[in-house]
Amino acid sequence: MSVLHEVSTPQSITSLVSAITNMPILILNVHSLCNCRCVMCDIWKRDTREQIQVENLERHRLSLQNLGVRQVVLTGGEPLLHNDLAALCTFFRDQGIRITLLTTGLLLFKRANEVANLFDDIIISLDGPRQVHDNIRKVGGAFDFIDKGIAAVRQYNPYLPITCRTTVQKANHNHLRETVNAAKAMGLNSISFLAADLTSEAFNRPLVWPIERQNQIGLSADEITVLEVEIEHLILEYRVDFDQRFIVESAAKLRKISRRFREHLGQLSPKAPVCNAPWVSAVLEIDGAVRPCFFHNSIGNMTHSALEDVVNGKVAKEFRASLNVETNPICQRCVCSLNYSTVSDNPTN
């Protein structure tokens, strides 16, 4: 099978508008609420409690098969707030689909047995060492809840891959090495870094943040310099690109994090990452809306249509045909791209 990449490379119109027959990744927002109040996210501001019901997914079983879905990522909100995770996971497990949990980690201890047996891997949001993490999440003891939860899950399933990702922003830009050390002390398998999203309408933002709010999360010129020094120390001390990686990103990708903040200040022109998300994945919202990724608008709704009909519908095909990743302004400011290779069966971001 060929590698899927560089989707912005000019292609024939026939290729661009053709139906997707291989969509290996499905991201599912399973619960509307979150149990953190993160400074860089507005999901916690939702006031309605909703969750995806298994019975609403049942009629999409054939679509999942026809689209070749191999991995489902459960996100939200907080997936562990869902009151019937077993049924949800069983639905996908019966189809041989890998299940990834993306979580704040606050409920890992309480649901350790379930988590250890329902999921193939876990990704925890970790924003710094203890005090930094708790300040960003605005939950006292959040760091310790994660630490305790990981230990509990490991008791039930010692070999379950548990990783973390850190969103770099003003509150933690000078604590990256401390964050890596904290992740290692917790017994996590790896850590990944990405820049905070400052300009999109994703994550329950009905409108783009005003400049004042963006500046509360983004970095000043002096702070970017501090971040760049921190990243170079990170690369050197952890031998990024040389040893078996505990840090997922390459040195080049780590350096791109500071570039995002310089772009925001107008010091550099925005540059889109290599991404093929709209061609290999979809994001399903609780209300049935289907997005090509977190940041682009809905291409349809699967409430009254089969998932494959939405993904290969007129709106979706026209979107993919017109999308040039290199020049699209949303793509140019993307902080969470996907470059999926069917050779390695691994997404890179």
Image (spheres, rainbow, N blue to C red):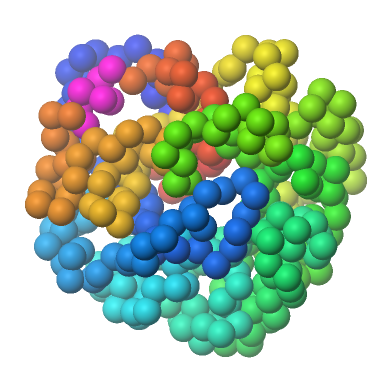
Q: Nearest the camera: 196 or 71?
A: 196
Where residue 266 sits: x, y (%)? Answer: 68, 14
Going by the image, does 29 lie left or right of 146? Answer: left
Where residue 120 sits: x, y (%)? Answer: 47, 69
* Quadrant location of the C terminus in the rendered image: top right
Can residue 82 be seen here? yes
Judged by its main secondary structure, the magenta piece is helix
Q: Residue at x 45, y 34 (%)?
A: 207
Q: Residue 321: say if magenta.
A: yes
Q: Which residues are magenta?
A: 316-322
Can residue 277 be seen here? no
**Residue 311, placed above or below residue 244:** above
Where residue 106 sits: x, y (%)? Answer: 61, 73
**Which of the 4 image quarters holds residue 303?**
bottom left
* Quadrant location of the N terminus in the rendered image: top left
Where residue 137 sits: x, y (%)? Answer: 67, 59
Going by the image, does 90 lie left or right of 337? Answer: left
Q: Residue at x 38, y 17 (%)?
A: 324
Going by the image, does 258 lie left or right of 233? Answer: left
Going by the image, does 313 lie left or right of 221? Answer: left
**Residue 80, placed above or below residue 226:** below
Q: Residue at x 66, y 31 (%)?
A: 212
Q: Nearest the camera: 146 or 309?
A: 146
Q: Nearest the camera: 268 or 137?
A: 137
**Which of the 4 image quarters holds residue 84?**
bottom left
Count the marks: how many? Answer: 0
Q: Residue at x 57, y 30 (%)?
A: 210
Q: Residue 14: say if magenta.
A: no
**Residue 149, placed above or below residue 285:** below
